[in-house]
Amino acid sequence: MEHTSKLIKGSLSSLLDNRRIALCITGSVGAVECAAIARGLMRHGAEVFVIMTKMAQKIIHAYLMEWATGNPVITELTGQIEHVTLAGKHDNHVDLILIAPATANTIGKIANGIDDTPVTTTVSSGIGAGIPVVVVPAMHESMYDHPAVISNIERLREIGVDVMSPRLEEAKAKIPNAVAIIERVIGHFGPKDLQGQHFVLTAGPTRGWIDRVRFITNPSTGKMGIAMAMELMSRGASVTLILGPSSEKVPHGIDVVRVETSEDMLKVALSAVSKKAPRAFISSAAVLDYVPTEKQEEKIASGSKKLTVDLVPTKKIIEEVRKKHPDLMIVGFKVEAGVTDEDLEKRARSKIDAGICNIVVANDSQRAGVAFGTETNEVLIVGPEGLIEKVALKSKREVSKHIVDAIVGLK
């Protein structure tokens, strides 16, 4: 009988379906993140096998990782030659080896071919077998800046090992968040067709202030736009994400500019497009169409039986970008409510026929699991020659792949 922990496999997406990942854990306090990393990989469809050093077992117990993955944990190498079973030169080896967290000690051993732990021996076998390896350093910043550690990391990169950059905070080189690590793994199995290209992307809601403490807004969370940024980054692109007020986590490595009002978003978008010369401008933000005429400087007193707020239309960001950049690829998002697919396509097409957008991604917020605040989406992708694709209800991360495919395919 299959371990019940495996019931989560593929619950978020199928991006890692049929992929087998070896998760190597070493003796850094960052090991406390490994259950989340393993479970996240599984939710995208992966099968995860854990290898731990003795020092890693002093930080988290092997039972935790057995529970997390539903597979036995390798804590020593035996006559079963576990390192070869997982990472040898044969057809059934794992598809990728992830060392997260990787201590300075382990990095030095891998860089110099020293095999004295289950982790280093498995990684050496994997490198020799041509298996992709991702190393995620985690240590104090003073150690990370040691010339020998710097040299060892460069050595790893020279031999084809992918080394992630840590988060430099509080004098520590911290392990990136689990989402960023999982995205790095996903990127290894996807196309690198956007290498060296840049994209400017808006996401999330905007606010229109009524007074010092009150504002109008909409239910957007920015989930779709952040998923788009992840997909672009996984395919080799760099991204400037202009994000309205949102509590969603953004993976390490994405350049985020946080804004609040529609006016702020417009200003930053125009500046970023002009400076970065991107491959495309993607407008997934739910920008307010109307905002209060003016913000009251003081808090409006409570108790009135009636309060009237005058609203004025905001400038359309995609239209303003198009005026200044007539040849730029622009991808717009259009949300409707309670319409048929035929009407949804027609309304999306109006932006293309007007010359404002090259691609429009349209959805209907009245459909179950679609649009604001959900983990899933269902969209029509409309291009110059007609409907490119109808994407049935999927996770926003999977939907983003279809949208980026359409961008890549548009010449």
Image (cartoon, rainbow, N blue to C red):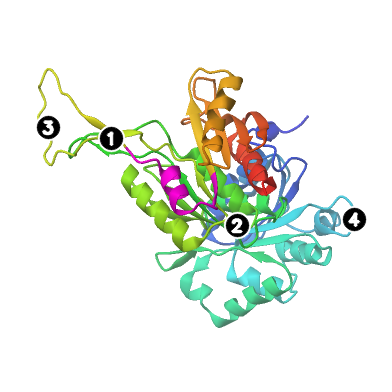
Quick one: SS at disc 3? loop
Question: Relative to 55, does residue 359 appear above or below in the rendering?
Answer: above
Residue at the disc numbered 4: 90
Q: Amino acid at mark 3?
A: Ile
Mark sitting on residue 325: none
Q: Nearer the viewer, mark 3 or mark 1?
A: 1
Depth check: 188 or 2 in front?
188
Q: Which residues are magenta?
A: 314-330
Q: Are marks 3 and 2 in contact (CB under 8 Å)?
A: no
* Mark positioned earlier in the residue sequence (2 or 1): 2
Depth check: 361 or 99 in front?
361
Mark sitting on residue 300: 3
Residue at the disc numbered 1: 291
Q: Are marks 4 and 2 in contact (CB under 8 Å)?
A: no
- Between the residue at mark 2 and the residue at mark 1, the CA separation in whole angstroms equals 34 Å
Query: Residue at the spot x=76%, y=61% of the render?
Result: 122
Left or right of 290 on screen, residue 16: right
Q: Which residue is situated farthest in the bottom direction here? A: 147
Q: Is residue 63 visible?
A: no
Q: Nearer the viewer, mark 4 or mark 1?
A: 1
Q: Amino acid at mark 2?
A: Ala
